[in-house]
Structures are given as structure tokens and as C-alpha cells.
Image (cartoon, helix red, strand yellow):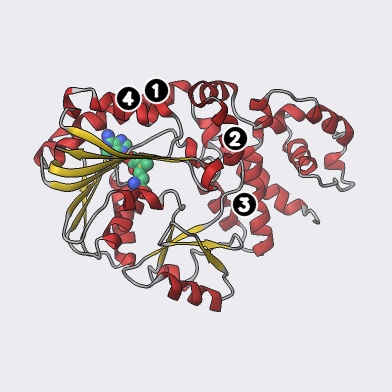
Amino acid sequence: MKLHNNTIRGVHTALQAIFEEGQYADKVIERTLKSNPKWGSKDRSFIAETTYEMVRWWRLINFLSPSTNLWDLFGTYWLMQGNDLPDWEEFERLHPEKIKAKYESIKDPGLLESVPEWLHNLGAKELGAIWEKEIHALNEEAEVVLRVNTLKTSRERLKNQLAEDGIKTYILKGYPDALILEERQNVFRHPAFKAGLFEVQDASSQLVATTLAVEPGMRVIDACAGAGGKSLHLAALMENKGKVISMDVEEWKLQQAKLRARRNGVSIFEPKLIEGSKTIKRLKETADRLLLDVPCSGLGVLRRNPDTKWKLSPESIEKVQQTQQEILQSYPSMLKKGGQMVYATCSILPSENEEQVKKFLASEAGKDFELLEEKKVFAHENGFDGFYMARLLKK
Ligand SMILES: C[S@@+](CC[C@H](N)C(=O)[O-])C[C@H]1O[C@@H](n2cnc3c(N)ncnc32)[C@H](O)[C@@H]1O
């Protein structure tokens, strides 16, 4: 593949914003691509993919070529991919043979998988032998998965419609609403997306709403709804009958959810900002179903958000675990007796998952609850994001 100075500079700009200004990789890439309308689709793919991959392998790249010069780091990454470097003065400082020998001498699995040492130790402590397989799988590039909006179309119809425009997809057994793109591409500009016929949502994430066992006509609370990904799925499973009350502590996320609900043709969506414990108390025993898609470390979605590795800290994980238990202690009061709830995370750490549920069940707030089902989804097993979900009954 031929390298272009101009697109490599695009990657540099993005990396600076991610590592020096601490901005989120997906937003930075979106902005970088918008900044130069002259880049064609190949240039855009190169910038997006290279930036993501360099963020993913940042620890390893910096070990192989300790340098603050982004040309050195890019060149090292390029060599790691098995490519040759062009004869440019920017790459003069690099010695491919030395880099290769250094790579081959690495024994530390945390370094080889490019994970911060503290995180590697934590993962190994919590998951044992599974950790190495899982972190390896989480370092692979994620496939693009669509969730068909069954309120507006069927999977077969959407598959054919996309195929007519040259977008090939395949069907995944066990995931009734999922379509996977055969080739990675930007589908957000496609008219079918603008018409609300699909959302982009990982296959594992699509298991969450289905696990809640909703039915048309129910009153469902999605208590950590964010921008509404799971709320939209719940509404589709409920055939747009009943009510989905989407709550969050961040108003701007609910605003986004509102726009998405409109695009998806969801009319049973009701946003509700959480302003404190009063908001929760007012909804006491009003829900047939409750979804707690709680904030988490995001370790299960490292394939699409590799920058998470460098933003997390032992303290931030501890803090998010506290929030998870606080939510578990108070929000289930919104559920009616006989109702069911799902506690879900996109984390693979037992301390954010089954241990939180156990702690809740052993507490006063959990004494009326019974664990019905638990799903631990690992990327090394199903090839998609790592997720956890527990379904509980309020007796
Ligand atoms: C995993 S995200 C939710 C993703 C969303 N359900 C979706 O499918 O797109 C967790 C959400 O919890 C929200 N959150 C954080 N603290 C919260 C709290 N105390 N109560 C309710 N929501 C909270 C965050 O703003 C974030 O949107």
C-alpha cells in the first residue's frame, strides 16, 4: 500500500487530540475527517483505521520505539503490520531490524497485548486464564453490526435494499434482528439509516433488550438510557405499544435519544431526567420491566473504543463500581411486584457483574429478588463485544 504524507499528518493530528488533550477517539476521528473534504474514501478509511489501531497498540508501539515524534511512532506501527517503509527522511531514524528483534524478545503478555500493567494484573486476578484469551479477542477490529428496526422493515427486506446499493451483509444465527456488514463502511449516510430502518448496534448489545422479556403494552423503565440505543430496541420488541420511560442523569443524552426515537418511528418513548432520589421515589412500583444498563469500565467494548484502556485507572473502576451498587440499591424500587429487571454492563470483570448482583441479593434492598438467569458474553467466545446481563424477578 502506498503511503501519503498528507493522510499520515491527519493521523498525527488525531493522535495529538486523543493523547495530549484526552479527547474521545471516535469524536476526534469524526472531526479530523470532516476537516479535509478533499480526502477520498480510501484516505478516510486509512486515517480512521490507522488512528484506531495506533491507539490500540500505543503501549507496544511506544515500547518498541520510545519517542515523542509521531513519525517514529507511525513508522513503527507500519513495520509492526509487516509493511516496508518508504525511503523518506521522516523515517530515517528507524531501524526495522532492531525493532523486529525487540518485538521478538517480548515475554510480558500485558505488553504484547498492549494493555496497561495495572489493568493486565487486575484482569488476570479476576478472570484467570480467560483474561489472556479475552484481551486478545478485544484487540481485534470489531465488525459493523446493524440492528434492523422491525417497526419499519424486516431483516430480509433491509438486506435486499442494502444489497441493491452494493452493501453486502450476512445474517447471524441467534440474533434475530442483526445484520453484519461484509465490508466495513460508513453506513450513516445511507438513506435507509436516515429513514430509521436500522441502527448500528453490536450483536452482544442486542441481547440486552431481548433478555428483558418485554411484551407489547407493558410499562418499561430504561433507567440508564443514555442516547437510547436499548430503549429503541425495547420499543421495537414491544411493537410500539405500551410505554418506554428512558431515564438518565445527562439531559443531552436524552435529547439525542429523542431524535433517534423520532427517526425510528417510536411513539411510546418518554424521556425523564433523573434529578435526584426524588425522581426515583416518584416512580415507586410503576414498572413491569426495568433495565439497568449501568455505567461501567467499558472493558467489553475495547475493540470499538480502544482509547478506554488509557483513560481508565484503578480509581475510576472503583468509582464506577460504587455507582453500580448505588443504582442497584435504589432503582429496583421502581419495579412492580412480579416484575422483572435486567442488570447489564459492557464489562467482563466479575467485580462489576456477578459480584455486584450477589452483593445486591444479599442486601436488604435485594431481599425480595430472585436471580432467574445470567449471561456472560465473552468476545473470545462469540466474536462480538464482551457483555454481562442478569435477569431478576421481584417476588
Ligand atoms: C452504559 S451507558 C447506557 C447506554 C444506553 N443504555 C444505550 O443503550 O445506548 C450508562 C448510562 O448511565 C448513565 N448514568 C450514569 N450515572 C447514572 C445514574 N446514577 N443514574 C442513571 N443513569 C446514570 C450515563 O449517563 C450513561 O448514559
The residue located at (54%, 35%) in the rendering is 21
Of circles 4 and 2, the one toward us is: 2
Query: Is 328 placed left or right of 166 in the picture?
Result: left
The residue indicated by pointer 2 is: 133
Between the residue at mark 2 and the residue at mark 1, the CA separation in whole angstroms equals 24 Å
Between the residue at mark 4 and the residue at mark 1, the CA separation in whole angstroms equals 6 Å
Could you tell which of marks 3 and 2 lies nearer the N-terminus?
A: 3
Proximity of marks 3 and 2: CB atoms separated by less than 8 Å: no
Between the residue at mark 4 and the residue at mark 2, the CA separation in whole angstroms equals 28 Å
Proximity of marks 2 and 1: CB atoms separated by less than 8 Å: no
Disc 4 crowd, CA 10 A, few/some/many (<14, 14-19, 20+): some
Could you tell which of marks 3 and 4 lies nearer the N-terminus?
A: 3
Task: Name the kind of residue labelled 3 in the image.
Answer: Ala
Between the residue at mark 3 and the residue at mark 1, the CA separation in whole angstroms equals 32 Å
Disc 1 crowd, CA 10 A, few/some/many (<14, 14-19, 20+): some
The residue indicated by pointer 1 is: 318
> Can residue 282 be seen by looking at this rendering?
yes
Could you tell which of marks 2 and 1 lies nearer the N-terminus?
A: 2
Query: Is 114 placed left or right of 343 in the picture?
Result: right
The residue indicated by pointer 3 is: 48
The residue indicated by pointer 4 is: 322
Where residue 28 appears, as percent x and y from the top left, is 54, 47
Proximity of marks 4 and 2: CB atoms separated by less than 8 Å: no
Proximity of marks 3 and 1: CB atoms separated by less than 8 Å: no
Disc 3 crowd, CA 10 A, few/some/many (<14, 14-19, 20+): many
Where residue 341 appears, as percent x and y from the top left, is 24, 42
Proximity of marks 4 and 1: CB atoms separated by less than 8 Å: yes
Using the rendered view, name the quadrant where residue 393 is placed.
top left
Could you tell which of marks 4 and 2 lies nearer the N-terminus?
A: 2
